[in-house]
Amino acid sequence: MRRLWGRLTSVNVQKAVWALDEADLPYERIDAGGSHGIVREPAYRAMNPNALVPTLEEDGFVLWESNAIMRYVASVSPALAMPEDPRQRAHVEQWVDWQATSFTPAMRDAFWQLFRTAEPDRALVAASLAASQVYATILDAHLAGRGYAVGEGFTIADIALGCAAHRWLNLPAERPDLPNLRRWYDRIATRPAAARALGEPVG
């Protein structure tokens, strides 16, 4: 039995869901976090002491951190296997970590203020949009002439970056057009697993 704990409005849960679905691994998803609660309960914290989502539970094996879950899924699924070439694999790892440490954190204040705050702090929103624009522009330049984030095939780098881009592109704010990012995102968003992971309204 495989379970994934976490709500689909979480960008980190989206990454895990997309990876599991790309890998065609059956699982049960249980809403947790946010208004669903659960994450502060002792039974959940025994699995994930951080009281965060997602958490993957698989026949007694427990794993948290969305990027670790994606890497694990890639390690057990031929459909989502990492590139054999060590340099390409390193580039996949690079972009996965960049999403978590740079792009998504830069847009966090804009997201929280615009979607989850009754009276947004416009100064925070403007600063966050400016910071995230820097990273979105880096990604746009990288994607010029590319079908996928790394190499010639779909990888977990596309999942991590795709979930972040989904959130960034749906922020209700004006941003310059980034044609390479948009073209790449529109392509990978048509994948069935992407539709399931990103199907909930942003918020």
Image: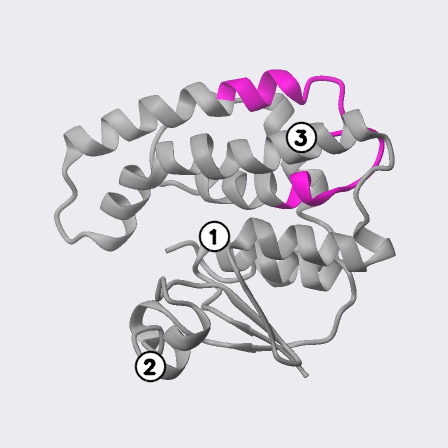
- The first of marks 1 and 2 along the sequence is 1
Closer to the camera: disc 1 or disc 2?
2
Q: Which mark is residue 42?
A: 2
Q: Is residue 119 left or right of residue 136?
A: left
Figure quadrant of residue 187? top right
Given this view, does label 3 or label 1 mark the residue nearer the observer? Answer: 1
Mark 3 and mark 1: Cα distance apart in space: 21 Å
Tell whether label 1 touches label 3 (CB within 8 Å). no
Residue at 79% from the left image edge and 60% from the top image edge: 76
Sequence order check, earlier mark of 2 and 3: 2
Residue 143 painted magenta: yes
Question: Mark number for residue 183?
Answer: 3
Q: Are marks 2 and 3 in contact (CB under 8 Å)?
A: no
- Quarter of the image where one finds residue 193: bottom right
- Alpha carbon of mark 1 to alpha carbon of mark 2: how far? 24 Å
Bin the neighbour count of mark 3 within 10 Å (Cα to Cα): few under 14, some 14-19, many 20 and up. Answer: some
- At label 2, the amino acid type is Pro
Position of the C terminus by quadrant: bottom left
Q: Which secondary structure lies at badge 3?
A: helix
Query: What residue is shown with label 1?
Result: 11
Image marks 1 and 2: residues in contact by CB distance under 8 Å: no
